[in-house]
Amino acid sequence: MWLPLLLFAFQVPCVQGVPIELAASPGWIEKGPAIASTVHEWLIRGCTHAPESRKLEVAMPRPALIALLCAAFAASCTQAPPPAPDNPNVKVSEYGKTPDGQTVLLFTLRNRNGIEAGILNYGGILVSLKTPDAKGEFADIVLGFDDLPGYLAKHPYFGALVGRYANRIAKGKFKLNGQEYTLAQNNGVNALHGGLKGFDKYIWHAEPAEDGEQRLRLRLTSPDGDEGYPGSLNVAVTYTLTDNDELRIDYSATTDRATVVNLTNHTYFNLAGEGLILDHLIQLAAEKYTPVDKDLIPTGELAPVEGTPFDFRKPQRIGARINDPHPQIQAGGGYDHNFVLDGEPGTLRRIAMVQEPTKGRVLEVSTTQPGVQFYTGNFLDGTLKGKGGATYHKRSGFCLETQHFPDSPNQAAFPTTTLRPGEEFTSTTVYKFSKGK
Ligand code: GLA
């Protein structure tokens, strides 16, 4: 497995014009994986993080080395022109290593107004988002950890890209083309957020923009049968931090067999940068929501929000009705519900506005998706130590997970989440940051 990787790696320095030093020594078979990991690191870092010189002790017999160099030379004759110089708006740094030795990289996008978004190639996790308040003071407004071990341990999807199917699938089962598929039951009897190893735990292939834009493209291939889902799925997610102070996320996916797809980002926002989110004001463009049973599986009904604690058509304090005796609020332990968004799915339209009264930050969310899961951190219980030693209590953050409705594969009346060969799934969500008056 490592040998082709190594071969390919020799082409990379040729493209980048960076010298590579090779040395022969015995024991190369045992050292193969270590070499592969070094080379892999270079490949992921790509052109934006080329060290000045690359010394790789390739421990292999001289004939094998010569053969590889010949192949590298032949390959270099067909290379593209040298890449653009480093992109100053996308910084790349090493964030840590996974237990199996894979390097996790942090990509920091920065726009002309000083807003910064930190994104990992592990899980595509948005680990930090620094935006100004009404006085121009910057703070990190997303929950998470200071370093990689926090993200490698069990946590409630802080900042992560979630797939292959975000949210719940009842009993971890669904039928497609007459065949029943069984998924892991990782949330009581239900399947949640892609299973035991969802996309939030993948190392994505990361491609920072080379045109000077503050943009990062992440890609992965989820193999046929991954976590029980049929079809090999190619997924691409692009984060763009615009100079209009928007964090835009574009998702796309294709498959080679019929499957189901629901992709989202699970960032927990706190627009004050600390404390609870109960005093934030939220407005949601949704006339209806999908009520759930005790396991948070939609009953299938699209219920009007009118006259319920789910009516956010006008701005309301998040905390105003969060402990209401309404049975749906009791079922969710607060808000943990999918809202049926007004307007045409497929059209990018504004669906939410959140204002924080003390610091004055405002968040507006637009999406092409049919729904959004409004989740108020009801399962945070003070046991997780987050950034700077912060304790994340219940309701320290809120999520607006733009998505298809939960359990759609088992709900014929919901917009379909089926993706077939030859089709492309696409969606876009934009988080726009501004200062209140
Ligand atoms: C989603 C779910 C919640 C919870 C969180 C993760 O938002 O709807 O019920 O599982 O993820 O803790």
Image: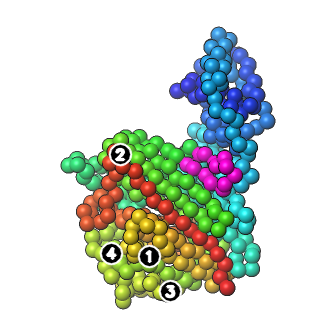
Q: Position of residue 98 (x, y in %)?
A: 60, 43
The quarter holding residue 313 reads: bottom left
Q: Is 240 contained in the magenta span?
A: no
| Foreground of the two, 261 or 72 | 72
Count neighbours of disc 4 (C-alpha within 10 A) and say few if under 14, some if 14 to 19, many if 20 or more. many
Q: Position of residue 268 (x, y in %)?
A: 55, 67
Q: Closer to the N terminus: mark 4 or mark 1?
A: 4
Which of the pair 327/251 is nearer the observer? Answer: 251
Residue extending farthest bottom = 307
Q: Is residue 82 left or right of residue 432?
A: right
Task: Give the Cα separation between the discs numbered 4 and 3.
Answer: 20 Å
- Mark 1 against mark 2, which lies toward the viewer? 2
Badge 3: how crowded within 10 Å, few (<14), some, or many (20+)?
A: many
Name the element at disc 4.
loop
User: Is label 2 or label 4 in front?
Assistant: 2
Give the residues in magenta. Answer: 206-218
User: Does 216 appear in magenta?
Assistant: yes
Q: Which residue is mark 1?
A: 335
Q: Residue drawn at (70%, 60%), measured in percent from left and top?
A: 110
Which amino acid type is shown beneath numbered disc 4? Answer: Pro
Query: Against 222, is 56 above or below?
Result: above
